[in-house]
Image (cartoon, rainbow, N blue to C red):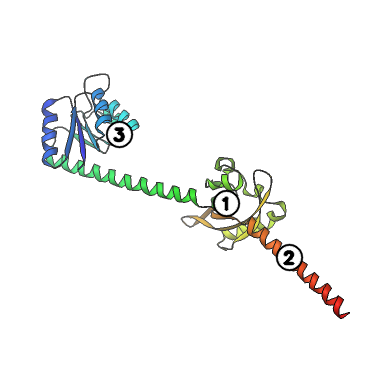
Amino acid sequence: MYKIMIVDDEVVIATQLEETLTAMGYDVVGTAASGEQAIEMAKELCPDLVLMDIVMPGELDGIDAARILKDECHIPILFVTAYTGYDLIDRAKDLRPTAYIIKPFQGSQIRASIEIALRNIELETELAASEEKYRELVENINDVLYSIDVKGLITYVSPQSKRAFGYTPSELIGTDYLRLIHRDDREAIGRRFQDVLQGRLLPSEYRLRAKDGAYRWVRTSSRPILSGSEVVGLNGVLTDITESRNAQEKLNQSKHLLEKTLASLFDAVFI
């Protein structure tokens, strides 16, 4: 059951709201008569939604109290007021209230506004959970995600860049991607960049300079970013393949040494 708190200095209105909400099946956890009391009560009761009158006695009106509740407690606000002046509405709308109900109100109006407000809360909660899940996914994978615009400037880098290469995203965003690439690989990678912008999707392997000055072998796969029909850049995934590349190099060296040894043995036996 959702918990709702009422803030209104008019006893008759507050009582009417409480009776209406209770009849609708909501749990009215408290009623406050001033902005100061509303803040104190909300911090203690943690309601899911606050029905807030705008004009009230005290140093804090409903808008000031609502701003504090949203900033400090993240509680959604539904304004209920008899005042429709543009100055009040302008102040109130900056807080992005879930609804704005004008007195005198009907029970059906209250029900509809609250149901919509609570549904929006559910959707925002689901969205926040989805964003958190995506953020954790991005931060916990080993590969580095990146975006580059058509001018070759880095526009996004995932946080893994710090762990993988020593650079924070802020150190890379806005810089030319080619400055990180080994000079012997730049020309080929520059051509591959243009290939990707034109839709030719082939992985690339090259040497990338880490913050400590050492070069790491990386493999990238990327694809164009479209805005309508216009290509505005590319998104990509970068994988550090230094260890596998070094292992392959050592294997090649061992094979070469083995072939030389076998050849020497062959010559010694048959010549």
| Residue drawn at 66 percent across, 56 percent down | 206
Element under disc 2 = helix
Q: Amino acid at mark 3?
A: Lys
Could you tell which of marks 2 and 1 lies nearer the N-terminus?
A: 1
Would you call the spot at circle 2 few (<14 residues within 10 Å), some (14-19), or many (20 or more)? few
Q: Position of residue 184 (x, y in %)?
A: 72, 54
Q: Is residue 250 left or right of residue 195?
A: right
Q: Is residue 239 left or right of residue 207?
A: left
In the image, 158: left or right of 33?
Answer: right
- Circle on res. 254: 2
At x 48% / y 50%, what residue is drawn?
138
Residue 212, located in which quarter of the rendered image? top right
Task: Please identify the quarter of the rendering in which residue 56 is found.
Answer: top left
Q: Which residue is mark 1?
A: 150
Q: Identity of the amino acid at label 2?
A: Ser
Mark 1 neighbour class, 10 Å CA radius: few under 14, some 14 to 19, many 20 or more: some
The CA span between labels 2 and 1 is 43 Å
Location of mark 3 (residue)? 93
